[in-house]
């Protein structure tokens, strides 16, 4: 369905208390479609905390929506037409625009007017989520085009765009928070952690490991410049960017991880078993329960201790469609290897870091929730 940009719908708001922690949980969507907060590496909230983004296929295609006057305000559809990449929306640091991926291009949307513009379009191919440097001048996104994987890097004004090739699928590229000339990214499968200069020089592997060490969800530890990652399902770990020294923060099945800005605490969900959503103190490794997720956490690979390889994807896809070829989880949203991404909580902080945004399909369809952190 098209022509729905700007459509305002009544609030779907309700609230409840978590049965274990007692946290107040705000349910923001209540629709029989798939609804998901923006990806855990990006904030779902505008800088003033008054608008919250979510994605939904409630009108037939993936589109971007907002909760106005969080948490009880009306819902507003922000995009229409061709589907967007459902996990790509990201607020520009200035807060007036949202950038997102459509096809093999990056677009911007001005929230006040819903005006859209195209930053760059590479034509055929596909792109992953985009990420800003600290200044908001530069963007990076994973790209796959003409059989070649890599990174697309350029300025938000559409200038200076170029491709940095890489021999395997690229996932989650992110600018260094203290030095925007560096980009960290994951290769799929192992070894995962790599870095490269914004201009394409200095490509190197940060940590050599094989497919039997299940390193996932790497990101920067707030503004510390260190890297944070999970060795699934064994430990939450950090690595020094300069010395490559590794240290274990806590030994448990931390899954998707989001640090606070100071790098003193890490928000995470858990899986196999799902014990809930926690905040981990980086200095001591102690963790405290925010709330239960009650999500189904789809994906057979999360019971394993290694990455899924081409044969695993092929076997999963043959079970449902013998004609499909093996692809990365980024391109196959319904496979049974890493699971439909909307069945995963993907928690992230609110701007004031007093609440936690997450997704759960506890009611039978994926909905967006915000839990107030029940401790200081």
Image (cartoon, rainbow, N blue to C red):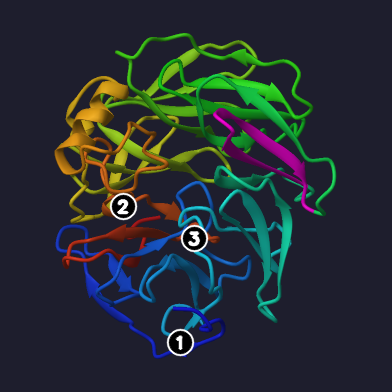
Residue neighbourhood size for the residue with mark 1, other residues' Cα within 10 Å, grouped as few (<14), some (14–19), many (≥20):
some
Does residue 34 appear anywhere in the picture? yes
Residue 85 is situated, as x and y percent measured from the top left of the image, at 50, 55
Residue 207's place in the image compared with 300, above or below, is above
Could you tell me how far apart the alpha carbons at marks 2 and 1 are, in whole angstroms?
23 Å
Point out the stretch of residues depicted in magenta. Answer: 138-156
Is residue 223 shown left or right of residue 147? right
At mark 1, the secondary structure is loop
Which residue bears the numbered disc 2? 345
Could you tell me how far apart the alpha carbons at marks 1 and 3 are, in whole angstroms?
19 Å
For the point 22% across and 47% down, the residue is: 297
Residue 248's place in the image compared with 301, above or below, is above
Residue 164's place in the image compared with 209, above or below, is below
The reply to whether callout 2 and callout 1 are in contact (CB within 8 Å) is no
Q: Main secondary structure of the magenta part?
A: strand
The reply to whether callout 3 and callout 2 are in contact (CB within 8 Å) is no
Sequence order check: which comes first, mark 1 or mark 3? 1
**Residue 74 circle label:** 1
Residue neighbourhood size for the residue with mark 2, other residues' Cα within 10 Å, grouped as few (<14), some (14–19), many (≥20):
many
At mark 3, the secondary structure is loop
In which quadrant will I find the C terminus?
A: bottom left
Instruction: Residue at the far front: name it.
Output: 323
At mark 2, the secondary structure is loop
Which residue bears the numbered disc 3? 350
Is residue 286 shown left or right of residue 223? left
């Amino acid at each position: 369905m098209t022509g729905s940009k700007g459509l305002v719908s009544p609030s779907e708001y309700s609230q409840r208390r978590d049965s274990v922690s007692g946290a107040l949980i705000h349910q923001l969507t209540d629709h029989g479609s798939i609804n998901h907060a923006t990806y855990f590496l990006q904030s779902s909230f505008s800088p003033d905390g008054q608008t919250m983004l979510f994605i939904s296929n409630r009108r037939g295609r993936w589109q971007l929506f907002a909760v106005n006057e969080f948490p009880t305000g009306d819902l507003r559809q922000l995009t229409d037409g061709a589907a967007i990449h459902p996990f790509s929306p990201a607020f520009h640091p200035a807060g007036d625009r949202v950038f997102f991926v459509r096809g093999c291009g990056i677009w911007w949307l001005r929230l006040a007017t819903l005006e859209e513009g195209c930053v760059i379009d590479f034509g055929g191919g596909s792109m992953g989520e985009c990420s800003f440097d600290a200044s908001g001048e530069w963007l990076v996104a994973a790209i796959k085009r003409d059989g070649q994987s890599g990174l697309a890097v350029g300025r938000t004004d559409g200038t200076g765009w170029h491709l940095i090739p890489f021999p395997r699928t690229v996932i989650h590229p992110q600018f260094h928070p203290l030095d925007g000339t560096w980009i960290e990214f994951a290769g799929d499968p192992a070894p995962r952690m790599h870095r490269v200069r914004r201009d394409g020089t200095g490509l190197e592997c940060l940590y050599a490991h094989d497919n039997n060490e299940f390193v996932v969800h790497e990101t920067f530890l707030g503004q510390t410049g260190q890297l944070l990652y999970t060795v699934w399902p064994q430990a939450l770990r950090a690595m020094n960017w300069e010395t490559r020294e590794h240290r274990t923060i806590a030994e448990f099945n931390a899954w998707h991880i989001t640090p606070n800005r100071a790098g003193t605490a890490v928000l995470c969900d858990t899986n196999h078993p799902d014990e809930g959503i926690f905040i981990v103190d980086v200095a001591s490794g102690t963790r405290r329960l925010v709330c239960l997720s009650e999500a189904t956490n789809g994906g057979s690979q999360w019971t394993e201790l290694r990455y899924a390889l081409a044969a695993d994807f092929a076997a999963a896809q043959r079970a449902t469609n013998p004609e499909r070829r093996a692809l990365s989880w980024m391109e196959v949203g319904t496979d049974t290897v890493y699971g439909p991404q909307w069945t995963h909580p993907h928690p992230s902080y609110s701007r004031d870091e007093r609440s936690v945004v997450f997704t759960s399909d506890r009611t039978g369809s994926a909905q967006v929730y915000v839990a107030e952190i029940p401790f200081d």
